[in-house]
Image (cartoon, coloured by chain):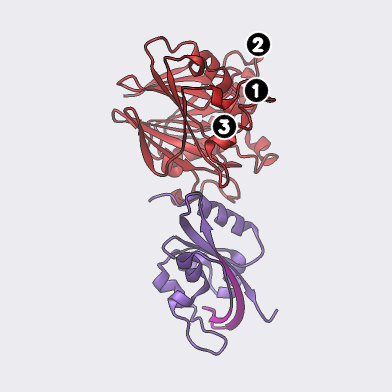
Amino acid sequence: MPQKPIELILMRQLASSLAMPIFLVDADGALAFYNEPAERVLGVRFEETGEMPAAEWSTLWDPTDLAGRPLAPEQVPLMIAVTKRKPVHVELWIRGLDGARRHIEATALPLMRLTDQVVGAVVIFWEATR
Amino acid sequence: MRVRLWGTRGSVATPGADTARYGGNTSCVEVRGPNGTVLVLDAGTGIRPLGGTLGRGVQRVDVVLTHLHMDHIQGLGFFDPLYDPDVETHLWGPASTTLDLRGRLLRYLSPPLFPVHLRELRRLVLHDLPAGEFDIGEFKVAADRVCHPGFTVGYRIAAGGVTLAYLPDHEPALGVPSFPMREDWTSGYGLARDVDLLLHDAQYSLGEYADHVGWGHTALEHALAFARLARVKHLVTFHHDPAHDDDELDRLTAEATAAVRVPCAVTMGAEGTVFELG
């Protein structure tokens, strides 16, 4: 099993120590990790979902825009960050795997390494109604 | 492949009778390939005595730096081949996001910190570390970033069917609730997996580590667990804490190896030790 880039490893370690919901993907957009605060918003423990490809997770939580239109995988903030290499902030709705619909705000950032290579992306999100 | 340890001490040189067995010089390792290539890992104070032994037949020396903390570059200005017109020295090391290796080294190799300016070293060739694997003589060298403050890499070096990994400054347990994690989530694993010889940071006892989390170094127990995870054949503990004299090192290592059983050989890094691989 190949080792993940150190930037991704350090980001996971940081995310594990923070109280904000954080979700991490690799350079292909595949789900790599989300922390315990994110589990509460997503309605499922990371151990239950594990890692999964972008095409799978990007629709798993049924994301929609504020008007209720479904977001295509490429419109999800993390996928914008990882493919377009730019930060993005959006409001959206998701349905947690516990069944609850949640209005969230999300700020996604690409993780770039020294050689200008994207090694992944991270999104920090929170419930907008709080 | 022949590997000789010229400096195994971490942080600052610690000469004296109490450290004579394991040595007081800071990080430096000489690696000789089957075809005679001379590769030097780090330029701590151990590089000064190494420089005096290279002999007249050597026309090129390659020095690879893991990072630019002082204990890894302090001997560089005292490395005889730099002043020998018959020897070309190639120095490889990590750039930062804003400075290349030359710009970073100039902060030390220039007055007032050092009397000789980098530009005066006519036969010194600097290389920013390339991405991916590269060749130095018969060595296949791979560098990758590891968990340590600043821009720090470890190395994996292969030649003649044997492999060495060098991670002298490394804190793979940082932020990990229960070390080790899975292989792919462990810093340094890609460099160290299945190597014949691993030289690895083992600066602290487990108790000391608790007071130094984030300083970039490893507890002996974590070094052992890392070696087991990476399935290395032989672990050499390295970067000994300057506060640990020889007797203390013996005691701490005995405690750690009793607590963490590993299926590989474990040797405490000592100046002058030679390992023949292959």
Tell me which residue sits at (29%, 30%) in the image. B161
- The alpha-carbon separation of the residues under discs 3 and 1 comes to 30 Å
The relative height of residue B22 versus residue B227 in the rendered view (above or below) is: above
Q: Are marks 3 and 2 on the same chain?
A: yes
Q: Earlier in the sequence, mark 2 or mark 1?
A: 2
Please tell me whether mark 2 sits on a helix, a strand or a loop.
Answer: helix
Residue at the spot of label 2: B17
Is residue A46 at all visible to an observer of this figure?
yes
CB contact under 8 Å: marks 2 and 1: no
Q: How many marks?
A: 3
Disc assigned to residue B202: 3
| Percent position of residue B130, x then y | 42, 41
Q: Amino acid at mark 3?
A: Ala
| Percent position of residue B20, x then y | 60, 13
Residue at the spot of label 1: B114
Q: Amino acid at mark 1?
A: Phe
The chief SS type of the magenta part is strand
Chain letter for purple, please: A
